[in-house]
Image (tube, rainbow, N blue to C red):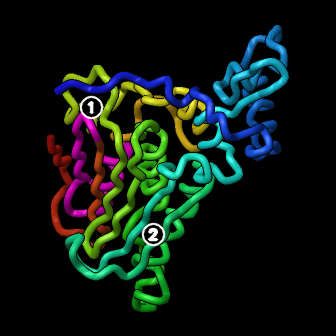
């Protein structure tokens, strides 16, 4: 299996956008956080360029895809593929009835927060759908769900017109994103269980997510998912990977049976 190398598309400019389309408070806080880690001779005015947030052409600073994704006021106005589609299906297949859907817009941190809220609303723990005696249980651990969402959103192919999708069924949750794993990974099943390699498709987006507390860049993402699911559910997570996409399936915590979970990997 061949994989795609990291893309420079994240640092391409969005010519119809201006710096006013960014949340300046969030950008300034990010730059301040990065300044503490960078050499002192770098001028603050150059930081946004160095971090892949803008491209300067004379007095004009044009935001990049990365900047809008992380800090845009309304990034989907310019990049509609950055919408996160969420759907709750009453059943086990895509042809079963749709209970609820949400097309989430906003910068990446907001997408993670609102998608987590969507899952919480339509799974065990929701007062609308679950018995009162089960209100302290959870089908999907919030930290685990965040890990899956951040992986999908950070490592998606930003050139693809496809949206990241979260599909919530009665027995499982699926998160699909366009863009396969970057290379080189010889044994992907072993990587899913053991980790140790950090190869972000979008290095500047990944750096931003890490600085914002949404990622580590330590190669622990998939192993954390595997071990957390193994402790929560009867079956392990399923990682379906191709050159074009990745889909992570988490079994519902309600599927707890006897015996440990196991990673199931599908090419």
In the rendering, at what x and y percent does residue 247 appear? 29, 49
Image disc number at residue 232: none
Nearer the observer: mark 2 or 1; the answer is 2
Residue 109 is at least partly visible in this image: no
Q: Which residue is mark 1?
A: 191
Question: Residue 183 magenta-drawn?
Answer: no
Measure the alpha-carbon separation of dots 2 and 1: 27 Å
Q: Residue at x 82, y 44 (%)?
A: 25
Image disc number at residue 119: 2
Q: Residue at x 47, y 82 (%)?
A: 126
Compare residues 59 and 230 and report the one nearer the observer. 59
Q: Residue at x 84, y 15 (%)?
A: 43
Q: Please, is residue 154 above or below residue 255 in the view?
A: above
In the rendering, at what x and y percent does residue 258 appear? 16, 66
Question: Residue 240 magenta-drawn?
Answer: yes
* Quarter of image, res 10: top right
Side of 184 where 55 appears, left or right: right
Q: Secondary structure at mark 1?
A: helix
* Quarter of image, res 144: bottom left
Q: Which residues, given as a range, are shown in magenta?
A: 224-244
Q: Quadrant of the N terminus?
A: top left
């Amino acid at each position: 299996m061949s994989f795609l190398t990291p893309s420079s598309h994240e640092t391409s400019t969005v010519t119809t956008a201006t710096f006013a389309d960014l949340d300046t408070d969030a950008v300034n806080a990010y730059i301040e956080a990065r300044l503490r880690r960078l050499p002192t001779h770098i001028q603050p005015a150059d930081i946004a360029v160095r971090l892949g947030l803008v491209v300067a052409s004379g007095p004009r600073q044009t935001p990049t895809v990365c900047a809008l994704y992380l800090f845009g006021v309304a990034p989907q106005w310019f990049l509609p593929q950055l919408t996160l589609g969420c759907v709750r299906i009453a059943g086990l297949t895509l042809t079963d009835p749709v209970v609820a859907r949400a097309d989430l817009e906003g910068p990446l941190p907001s997408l993670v927060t609102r998608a987590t809220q969507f899952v919480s609303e339509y799974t065990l723990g929701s007062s609308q759908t679950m018995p009162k005696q089960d209100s302290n249980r959870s089908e999907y651990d919030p930290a685990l769900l965040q890990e899956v969402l951040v992986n999908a959103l950070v490592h998606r192919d930003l050139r693809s017109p496809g949206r990241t999708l979260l599909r919530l069924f009665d027995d499982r949750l699926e998160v699909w994103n366009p863009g396969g794993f970057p290379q080189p990974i010889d044994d992907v099943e072993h990587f899913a269980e053991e980790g140790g390699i950090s190869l972000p498709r979008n290095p500047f987006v990944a750096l931003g997510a890490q600085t914002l507390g949404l990622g580590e860049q330590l190669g622990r993402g998939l192993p954390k998912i595997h071990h957390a699911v193994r402790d929560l559910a009867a079956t392990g997570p399923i990682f379906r990977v191709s050159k074009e996409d990745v889909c992570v399936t988490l079994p519902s915590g309600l599927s707890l049976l006897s015996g440990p979970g196991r990673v199931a990997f599908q090419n």
